[in-house]
Amino acid sequence: MSGRQADCFISNVSRKRDGSVCYNGVIIGLGNVMPLITVKDLRKTYEGEDVKTTVLQGVTFSMEKGEFVAIMGPSGSGKSTLMHILGLLERPTGGEYRLDGNDVAELSDNELARLRNKRIGFVFQAFNLLPKTTVEENVELPLLYDSDPMERNGKRIAEALEAVGMTHRAKYFSNQLSGGEKQRVAIARALVNDPDIVFADEPTGNLDSKSGLQVMRILQRLNDAGRTIILVTHETSTAEHAKRILRVVDGKIVSDDPVLTRKIAKDGEESLK
């Protein structure tokens, strides 16, 4: 038995220093591999005229490529701010953020924008679709900054819509869609540039149970295909569709645990029939 395997028997569940997760003596995930995301002592403070508001206080963790991680916490905990920093939408006040080993602080705003467009996709609670615009046109938006020929862009749009089961609605206007359909279009838009990471911020918050499970099923399927998914939510039932949960309270990580009894959205959909 190797030393790494022996270490796994110290407890039923543990996360080792090299990033491996041990569960009942079995190593889950890779160790000794450069993490996709590494943050150390990450801090964020917003300054007004007379007041400073500290939102993140010394956050430290790492994520490997291909993980499905839920960042969970109550309103005001700092979870959305953390997602904005990880998604290159905001810069931290202090600490270190490395993406694929590269120090994000060294990148210019233009470099961050290019990196964000090529490697990151976003899904938001409010869908953020353009009104009076077709489904295809909404999905095309991230490609407007791309130099690829239009015929290739058309193929990418079609593939993204197919991935979320919305090909039949391609010519519909966004205001003709249900809430669940709008979120599926938003996911297609997040996928059209084939990003390494998809951030989903409360993606089921405005949806009924059935539509919410459809969205979680798509996210689980994307993760099964190797895509890194980072889910932000305040609901335990939603977070348990991930494989790992980071809990944030008052700007600090209070726990970092694998999901031992994971919810499978497909099973949930069957139970609603």
Image: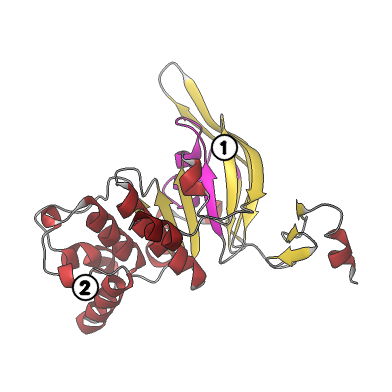
149 vs 161: above or below: below
Q: Residue at x 59, y 62 (%)?
A: 36
Left/right of residue 65 with respect to residue 266 in the rendered view = right
Residue 75 horizontal/vertical position (percent): 44, 31
Q: Nearer the viewer, residue 266 or 243?
A: 266
- Under mark 1, the amino acid is Val
Q: Check if residue 73 falls in the magenta segment.
A: yes
Q: Nearer the viewer, residue 220 or 55?
A: 220
Left/right of residue 138 with respect to residue 238 in the rendered view = left
Q: Residue at x 45, y 41 (%)?
A: 80
Q: Residue at x 20, y 62 (%)?
A: 138
In which quarter of the view is residue 249 placed? top right
Quarter the C terminus occupies: bottom left
Residue 90 horizontal/vertical position (percent): 44, 45
Separation of disc 2 and disc 1 at Cα? Answer: 38 Å
Quarter the N terminus occupies: bottom right
Q: Nearer the viewer, residue 142 or 207?
A: 207
Q: Earlier in the sequence, mark 2 or mark 1?
A: 2
Name the residue beneath numbered marker 1. Answer: 248
Residue 157 horizontal/vertical position (percent): 25, 73
Left/right of residue 260 with respect to residue 50 in the rendered view = right
Residue 133, numbered label: none
Residue 256 horizontal/vertical position (percent): 65, 46
The local crowd at label 1, few if under 14, some if 14 to 19, many if 20 or more residues have their Cα within 10 Å, is many
Residue 167, numbered label: 2
Q: Check if residue 234 falls in the magenta segment.
A: no
